[in-house]
Amino acid sequence: MRLRREGKKKAPYYRVVVADARSPRDGRFIEDIGFYQPLTDPSRIEINSERALYWLKNGVQPSDQVKQLLRVSGIWEEFKPGDPGRDRTHKIEERRKAAEERDAKIAEAEAAAAKDLEERRAAEEAEARAAEEAAQAEAEGPAEGDEETPEEPAAEEAAAEETPAEDAPAESEEA
């Protein structure tokens, strides 16, 4: 749906026509559904609403200027492209809800990133503390005599256990 220019030079007069998108501006058209006279005061718009609605419901896309003319004449409000029954405030409400949902998702992602960062920092701090403690333990390390002392009692216990075992078979042979 578009405008077809007619009239004299510097005195335009437009016809609202339904035409194939491939045809030239002032060329072949399918149906003439109204007119627009911009130079009259006030400008004059007459569009056959029944035929305009028919074509709109069958998928015809109006040009920007024709869409504006349809709004002025009230035909566009009758058509309400998309979901019938929606008005301008409903669309604004939908946009607001979509923005709130988007903001909530962003906030969740930021919170998850902050939590992950805290966990990584805590793990790094724990590793650093463990490394420091290991370094301190190594620096303070036990003296050489201290290291042998824990091993000696274990060796003595093992030797003590072996001795009675050797004695026991010897006694049994004697008996």
Image (spheres, helix red, strand yellow):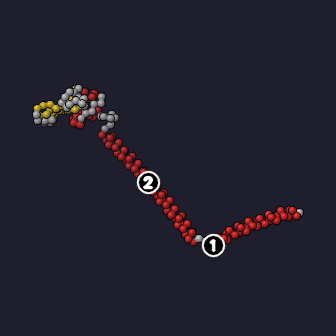
Left or right, residue 174 beside residue 31: right
Discs 2, 1 touching: Cβ within 8 Å:
no
Q: Which residue is rendered at x = 39% and y = 46% of the image?
A: 101
Q: Answer above or below: position of 55 versus 87.
A: above
Left or right, residue 142 beside residue 81: right
Q: Which residue is rendered at x = 24% and y = 29% of the image?
A: 20
Q: Which residue is rendered at x = 27% and y = 33% of the image?
A: 61
State which mark lies toward you, 2 or 1. 1
Residue closest to the far right: 175
Task: Return the disc, 2 or 1, that comes first in the chain's sequence.
Answer: 2
Check disc 1 and report its element: helix, strand or loop.
helix
Q: Position of residue 43 (x, y in %)?
A: 15, 35
Q: Answer above or below: position of 73 versus 104.
A: above
Q: Answer above or below: position of 19 versus 91.
A: above
Quarter of the image that includes the N terminus: top left
For badge 1, the amino acid type reads Glu
Say if residue 66 shows up in the picture: yes
Residue that label 1 marks = 144
Q: Which residue is rendered at x = 40% and y = 51% of the image?
A: 107
Q: Toward the viewer: 92 or 110?
A: 110
Label 1 CA crowd tier, 10 Å (few <14, some 14–19, many 20+) = few
Instruction: Tell me which corner region of the image, top left, top right, bottom left or bottom right, holds residue 170.
Output: bottom right
Say if residue 33 shows up in the picture: no
Q: CA distance from mark 2 to mark 1?
A: 50 Å
Q: Position of residue 172 (x, y in %)?
A: 86, 62
Q: Position of residue 112 (x, y in %)?
A: 45, 52
Residue closest to the far top: 30
On residue 125, which mark appears? Answer: none
Q: Position of residue 57 (x, y in %)?
A: 30, 29
For badge 2, the amino acid type reads Ala
Residue that label 2 marks = 113
Label 2 CA crowd tier, 10 Å (few <14, some 14–19, many 20+) = few
